[in-house]
Image (tube, rainbow, N blue to C red):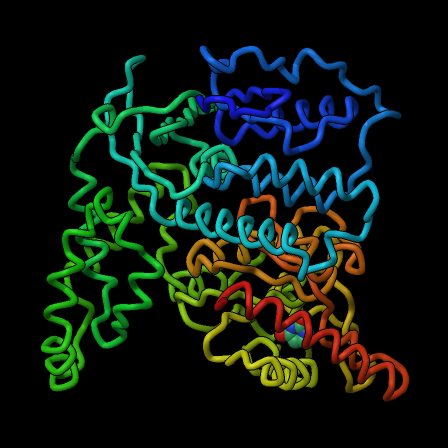
Amino acid sequence: MTALAIGVRYSAELEHAADFRGFRDGVRRLWLAGVAPRDVAWTVGPPAQGLFEAAPSASSLRAPRPEEAPRVPKAFVDLSRLVICHKAPDRFALAHRILVRLQDEPTLLKVATDPDIARAEMMAKNVRRCSHKMKAFVRFRSTADPDGGERFVAWFEPEHHTLDLTAGFFERRFAGMRWSILTPDRSAHWDGAQLTMAGGASKDLAPDGDINEDLWRTYFGAIFNPARLKVQTMQSEMPKRYWKNMPEAALIQPLIRSATQTTGDMIAAEPRAPARSTRVARERLAEERAVAGLSGSIASLEDLAAAARHCERCPLHGPATQTVLGEGPRDAPLMFVGEQPGDQEDIAGRPFVGPAGQLFDDALEAAGIARDKIFVTNAVKHFKFEPRGKRRIHQKPGLSEIDHCRFWLQEERRLVRPQLTVALGATAARSLSGKAVTISKARGRVMDWPDGGAGFVTVHPSYLLRLPGAEARDNEMRRFIDDLNVIKEAVWG
Ligand code: URA
């Protein structure tokens, strides 16, 4: 609850700190009544009591009929949905001010240098990052559910108010188990069929530990590779503020301390089979995922390759030479998704090594993105073609082929967990979004895929190869490189 400031003409009450529905309703009423953003005090919780309680509530103002409502582009809705999750106290006033300005300045959102827009974009970026951290660092602990059976409970302290924004991700990921995520100002509860959002909780409600703690510690110890230790990168990816709620965090300092010594030992040592702890951790993790209704025992990209080798989910496996999965670092922060392997990829068993791949490499280089730092894959994993004499002519994959193959792409994303996934062209965008996407409309801005991961849409490199005339090709290449620069900025800042 926030006390009202002197000079305020209206108070606008919200049910919780990221109450987008309440904000939208309030801002429409205020706009219709011509109340200026500076004259509004946004309060979370019941109306303020005492000295300033005289300010009338925005809810007493008339709601606009559809034809009277303020006009805003969808991009504003997307932006303000993120901005109001930020912890800055002036977030509602900022979103209100942008809405008012948009009525006279319809292209305002494109003016990146405008102070309101720059601040809103920066806040949206912080919120996206916070939501990403929540997806990566929430740790469930097994408890007895009050109604019987098991419930997984996690305590988490996000930097911003991102639980409402991110709860859908956990719903989709852990649909088969009952879980609760508790944060200081909000909680989310899934009973296997329905998601309920409620008020904040205290840390005492979350169980301190159980047998899964051991699993996490073993797992984290096993995946920790001291030869690749970069303390700063590690701390920015797994900031200290989250350590206290993560069982494996107890291992971080000792592992950092012993890293130099261990690296020397590893170089000197003979090659050997994976440590027992690694195998045990993988087996236990696979068991846990199977219990949670997740996809079988695929715990690594190697497991995935073994499972996909004999894929017969659609008829494309027949004529193709082999399944072509993606390649790149297991922890790549950025994933590019193309359409399907072409003639050369089908033979080499690697994505983007033919003419489109060469053009893609040139554009990456121009944008300063190292290919060996990114994960490159395709929406469809088999080459679809029509034989014509000795040649194999590329054919676009159909919807059913894209949809059947989506499973493999989802598994790649689950294992790599990129911060940002880029669709190169319509097939990839269809696979990632589950619906048809018009590239010219979706292109050029960071948004969220339906599974909650951050996304970006741009053209496919082979579109550039097909353009008639050098001038058109040069222009489009420049636009493609511009997109890659935006992508690079979003991932590496
Ligand atoms: N086109 C794609 O979409 N992917 C490849 O791997 C090669 C060409």
Q: Is residue 348 above or below residue 284?
A: below
Seen in the picture, residue 349 relative to 223 is either above or below; the reply is below
Percent coordinates x, y for residue 23 in the rendering: 62, 28
> Which quarter of the rendered image does ligand 1 occupy?
bottom right
Q: Is residue 173 left or right of residue 109?
A: left
Tell me what residue is drawn at x 67 percent, y 63 percent. 316
Q: Which quadrant of the view contains residue 475?
A: bottom right
Q: Nearer the viewer, residue 176 or 266?
A: 266
Instruction: Look at 44% across and 67% down and name the residue there.
Output: 332
The quarter of the picture where the N terminus appears is top left
| Direction from residue 360 to residue 322 in the image, left or right | left
Q: Compared to 268, does 8 lie above or below? A: above
Expressed as whole percent of the image width and height from the top left, the position of residue 34 reads 77, 26
Q: How many marks?
A: 0
Q: Say if 378 sits above or below 178 in the image.
A: below
Q: Residue 145, how many percent across, how many down?
A: 28, 19
State left or right for residue 188 relative to residue 420. Answer: left
Residue shown at 42%/31% (left/top)? 176
Residue 320 is at least partly visible in this image: no
Taking the view exactly as shown, the residue that stands out farthest to the front is 7
Tell me, yes or no, if residue 4 can be seen here.
yes
Residue 68's spot in the image, x, y percent? 86, 25
Tell me which corner region of the image, top left, top right, bottom left or bottom right, holds residue 232: bottom left
**Front residue (pair 150, 66):** 66
Residue 341, quarter of picture: bottom right
For image coordinates 25% across by 69% down, the residue present is 231
